[in-house]
């Protein structure tokens, strides 16, 4: 963040409540806006950014637990909402997001750092939870994130994609409806209904399937030991 701020300090930054001063002080960004859950900020070109709830907590030390808010984001666009969950466990917020903002055209859902389950379940989805979240959201396509870089939990480094494949099969979800990417891989996500429903789409909705959004995974240094 400091390097980005050095290049473009006036870039707008949006953060949950209680984080603005920290971001200004620690990174150098100047234009920082705070949002509470379900608040939103208008952007250019008909876009609007919403802060939405997540099942998690916050802390930078032993003495400031839950003094700053956390959450996910929904980017509302004329072509449909895009959801970034951030860090979250299972909860009613997935259904609430769909009810308030509509089913996402695309969702980025965490699938890692889930073992041991008794300890991680309240703040981290496992792959089965993530598939259920995908279904609760009614997302057209989802991408698994939050795995493979930092050693945070007991599961093996690349267990999350394997467990995601098992969860897809268990819930009858098509592979292309919810997948992961290798470093440097690009996914042209269908900008329409999930692949499992593509065969039943008729008439004008076929055009939506020809549109796509491109998602790429940028390689990062691995801190797994």
Image: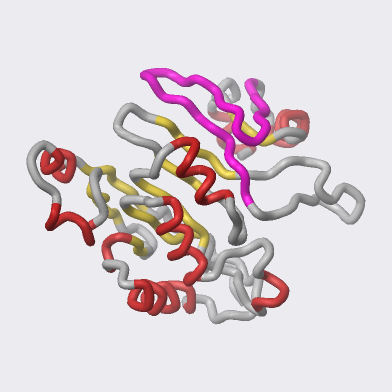
| Magenta stretch holds residue 101 | no
Q: Can you name the residue that lies furthest to the front here?
A: 99
Q: Position of residue 46 (x, y in %)?
A: 38, 20
Horizontal placement of 110 versus 174: left or right?
A: right
Picture layout, residue 194 above or below residue 207:
below
Q: Can you name the residue that lies furthest to the right here?
A: 63
Quadrant of the rendering where the C terminus is positioned = bottom right
Quarter residue 150 falls in: bottom right
Q: Position of residue 116 (x, y in %)?
A: 66, 79
The residue shown at (67%, 28%) is 34
The residue closer to the viewer here, 190 or 62, is: 190
| Magenta stretch holds residue 33 | yes
Quarter residue 177 falls in: bottom left
* Range of magenta residues: 31-54
Quadrant of the rendering where the N terminus is positioned = top right
The residue shown at (37%, 29%) is 77
Q: Position of residue 173 (x, y in %)?
A: 31, 68
The residue closer to the viewer here, 215 or 82, is: 82
Picture layout, residue 186 above or below residue 205:
below
The residue shown at (50%, 30%) is 49
Q: Position of residue 161 (x, y in %)?
A: 42, 73
Horizontal placement of 67 versus 178: left or right?
A: right
């Amino acid at each position: 963040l400091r390097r980005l701020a050095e290049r473009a300090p006036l870039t707008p930054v949006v953060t949950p409540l209680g984080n603005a001063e920290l971001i200004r002080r620690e990174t150098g960004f100047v234009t920082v806006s705070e949002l509470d859950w379900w608040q939103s900020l208008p952007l250019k070109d008909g876009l609007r950014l919403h802060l939405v709830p997540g099942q998690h907590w916050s802390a930078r030390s032993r003495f400031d637990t839950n003094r700053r808010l956390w959450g996910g984001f929904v980017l509302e666009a004329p072509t449909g909402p895009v959801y970034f969950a951030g860090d979250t466990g299972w909860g009613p917020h997935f259904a609430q997001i769909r009810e308030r903002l509509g089913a996402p055209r695309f969702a980025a859902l965490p699938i890692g750092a889930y073992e041991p389950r008794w300890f991680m379940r309240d703040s981290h989805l496992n792959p089965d939870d993530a598939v259920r979240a995908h279904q609760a959201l009614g997302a057209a396509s989802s991408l698994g994130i939050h795995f493979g870089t930092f050693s945070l939990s007991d599961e093996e480094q690349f267990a999350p994609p394997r467990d995601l494949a098992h969860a897809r099969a268990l819930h009858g979800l098509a592979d292309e409806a919810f997948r992961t990417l290798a470093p440097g891989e690009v996914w042209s996500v269908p900008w329409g209904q999930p692949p499992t429903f593509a065969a039943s789409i008729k008439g004008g909705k076929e055009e939506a399937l020809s549109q796509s959004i491109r998602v790429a995974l940028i390689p990062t240094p691995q801190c797994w030991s």
